Amino acid sequence: MCILFIALHQHPKYPLIIAANRDEFRQRPTAAMHWWQSPTADVEPSVLAGKDLSAGGTWLAIARSGKFAALTNFRKLPIDNSRQYTSRGELVLKAHQLGNAELTQLLSTQYQQYQGFNLLYGDQHGLTCFDSVNHQFTENKAGFFSLCNGALDDIWPKMARGEQALERFIASQSTRELNHQDLLGLLQDNQTAPDNLLPKTGLPYEWEKQLSAIFIRGEEYGTRSSCVYTLRFDGVAQVTEVTYDRSGDIDSQVEFSWQTETKSLLT
């Protein structure tokens, strides 16, 4: 995952709204979102997730309970290529498999096994973000926020732009059911940032400029998929994922809807 926009307890009907884009190299093989059936279903929950066919992990996964987890790579250069790192995609699955105490222990003690990352996880009761570069846990109980390839409190132009767009959209829809197609439209914004506002992460100017858009079009690297996840107070979860071809045009779309284990989230 490369950018997420989150609204937590900001809509009267939806305690959790997440809109996210995954940016990746075009040649990296990927499977679209589907239900993963755990071989140990009595221990590990099945999750709805896309799959990185190179390393076997994922970037975003949602359980039937409504619990959510996603990972963004931390853009911190230079990268130490002399080390062997464990794939970060497994952390999203561990966020579903482990209890909070076990996950906190793992992240606190084993983060150096992975290249820099942010792991966001939780449910409608609150979301926690672990930043492996700054070794910091941040909890959010309510509000609008965004997460990209730096620290949670970074204010990159596309983070601010998308967060503000989500806030305006939800304000205009406060009495209505949310339309996932409208939320997907927010994720397809390809406007780049002015040169004077570009973040300085160590990349060449051309890359920094291209990556400053919410939706990235590029021959070698770009936005591969968009995902919208909404959870209603009556416990209905809805997910829509759109995948894109090399030109940035829509290639496929899948939709999922289910009743979470908690039928009502009002209490």
Image (cartoon, grey):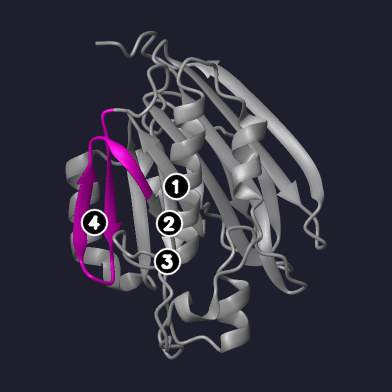
Mark 2 falls on what kind of element?
A: helix
- The residue indicated by pointer 4 is 106
Cβ atoms at labels 1 and 2 below 8 Å apart: yes
Q: Secondary structure at mark 1?
A: helix
Say which of marks 1 and 3 sits in front: 1
> Secondary structure under badge 4?
helix
Q: What amino acid is labelled 1 in the image?
A: Gln
Residue 171 vertical position relative to residue 144 in the rendered view, above or below:
above
Residue 160 got which mark? 2
Distance between mark 1 and mark 2 Cα atoms = 6 Å
Crowd around label 2: few <14 · some 14–19 · many ≥20 (10 Å): some
Look at 55% across and 32% down and name the residue there. 37
Q: Residue 217 at what x, y percent from top left?
A: 72, 65
Do the residues under discs 2 and 3 have CB atoms within 8 angstroms?
Answer: yes
Nearer to us in this view, 132 or 250? 250
Q: Residue at x 72, y 48 (%)?
A: 243
Closer to the eye: label 4 or 2 = 2
